[in-house]
Amino acid sequence: MKQIGLLNGYYSISSKFGNRDAPTEGASTFHSGIDIPAPEGTKLICIMDGEIVSTGWGGGSGYTITIKSIDGIYRFSYCHCSPEFIVSVGEQVKKGEVIGKVGPKNVYGITNNPYKDNNGNPTNGATTGCHCHFTIRKNGELIDPLEIIRKENIL
Ligand SMILES: [Zn+2]
């Protein structure tokens, strides 16, 4: 079955790219990407052919998967994802392929994780609930992911 979108079947953007009020302590007022809320376990879809450049803990970004486009121009990251990675560094991935899952809000086992919810439980980066924070860099500069998402006919 063909997978659709950035998160299979979830399209609504709760926070756009650019300046905003910080929604939670530790989150930046300049929003480096877009947020799409979706339940834990929602499939994350690769938006361009590329190669996995990193998978792991990204501090405020929580567990993160980063992909470099095949032409080397773009780097895009899926943040607050599941620590149960299904791709590994160096792996080639295709547009439309499932590369991971939305992670849980709370994660345990990170030493000195400074991010916590109102109950004091450690969170998957600076987050108030399950969502994908998606960023794209073009030649190293952050750009509005919607530009690419529209160009690639994704959402
Ligand atoms: Zn975000």
Image (tube, rainbow, N blue to C red):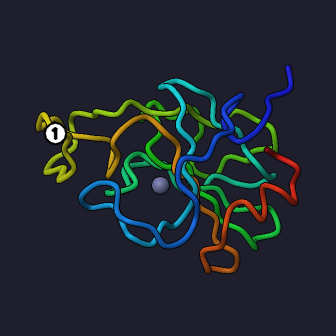
* 8 to the left or right of 13: right
Q: Nearer the viewer, residue 71 or 141?
A: 141
Q: Give above or below for 155 relative to 24.
A: above
Image location (x, y in percent) of residue 137: 64, 71
Image location (x, y in percent) of residue 91: 67, 46
How many numbered badges does the structure rendering display? 1
Q: Nearer the viewer, residue 24 or 103?
A: 24
Q: Quadrant where the N terminus lies? A: top right
Task: State which quadrant residue 24 falls in.
Answer: bottom left
Image location (x, y in percent) of residue 155: 79, 44
Q: Which residue is drawn at 42% across and 48% down?
A: 56
Task: State which quadrant residue 28 falls in.
Answer: bottom left
Q: Residue at x 56, y 61 (%)?
A: 33
Task: State which quadrant residue 142 falls in.
Answer: bottom right
Graded by Cα atoms within 10 Å as few (under 14), some (14 to 19) or many (20 or more), the crowding at tag 1 reads: few
Callout 1 secondary element: loop
Q: Which residue is drawn at 32% across and 57% down?
A: 59
Q: Give above or below for 19 relative to 91.
A: below
* 33 to the left or right of 99: left
Q: Mark 1 points at which residue?
A: 118
* 104 to the left or right of 50: left
Q: Which amino acid does label 1 sit on?
A: Asn
Image location (x, y in percent) of residue 47: 76, 49
Q: Which of 37 and 58 is in front in this view?
A: 37
